[in-house]
Image (spheres, rainbow, N blue to C red):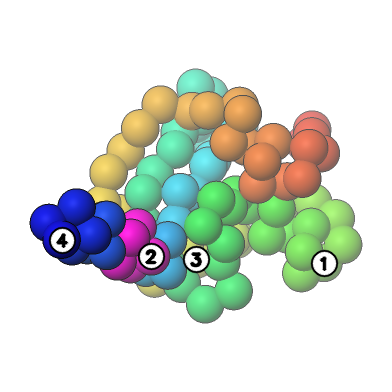
Amino acid sequence: MKKLIAISLLLAVAIAIYTQFTLFIVPPIGVVPEGRTVIILRLNKMNFVDSPDAMCDRMQGGVSLLCRGMTMAGVVEKSKIIARLPYSDWLYLLSTNGKRFDH
């Protein structure tokens, strides 16, 4: 019985994290040359693992410096950053479905 309660509690916490937070991956660019992964409170139209490039590609069908910058600024302005972590290329590729965007 205790095991069932522990598993149920763990599952509830995992669902809450998945639906309320986003791993936002900022690729290495001029402003942030080392890149960054941040955990933020989820905004509308965001995936659990997301990046400015993935958002631009979904909304506009491509990535430009302007879209990338506007997306990062909007996310930083409208969401709360919970934690800052090192850049993860694996998570970036996961967010973009394996695509790389060089701008």
Looking at the image, residue 103 lies above or below residue 18 = above
Q: Which of label 4 and label 2 is nearer to you?
A: 4
Q: Disc count in the image? A: 4
Mark 3, other Cα within 10 Å: few <14 / some 14–19 / many ≥20? few
- Which label number is shown at residue 85? none
- Which label number is shown at residue 1? 4
Q: Mark 4 and mark 2: span between their CA atoms? A: 21 Å
- The part of the image, by quadrant, that contains residue 1 is bottom left
**Amino acid beneath label 4:** Met
Which residues are the magenta region?
11-16
Q: Looking at the image, do the residues carrying marks 3 and 4 touch, with CB atoms under 8 Å apart?
A: no
Q: Say which of 1 and 22 sits in front.
A: 1
- Which label number is shown at residue 60? 1
Q: Position of residue 29 (x, y in %)?
A: 61, 31
Left or right position of 17 against 57 = left
**Amino acid beneath label 2:** Ile
Q: Of callouts 1 and 2, which one flags the residue occurring earlier in the amino acid sequence? A: 2
**Amino acid beneath label 1:** Gln
Q: Position of residue 56 (x, y in %)?
A: 73, 59
**Amino acid beneath label 3:** Gly
Secondary structure found at label 4 = loop
Q: Residue at x 49, y 66 (%)?
A: 74
The residue tagged 2 is 15
Quarter in which the C terminus is drawn: top right
The answer to if 101 sits in the magenta stretch is no
Q: Which of label 3 and label 4 is nearer to you?
A: 4
Q: Which of label 1 and label 4 is nearer to you?
A: 4
Q: Mark 1 and mark 3: span between their CA atoms? A: 16 Å
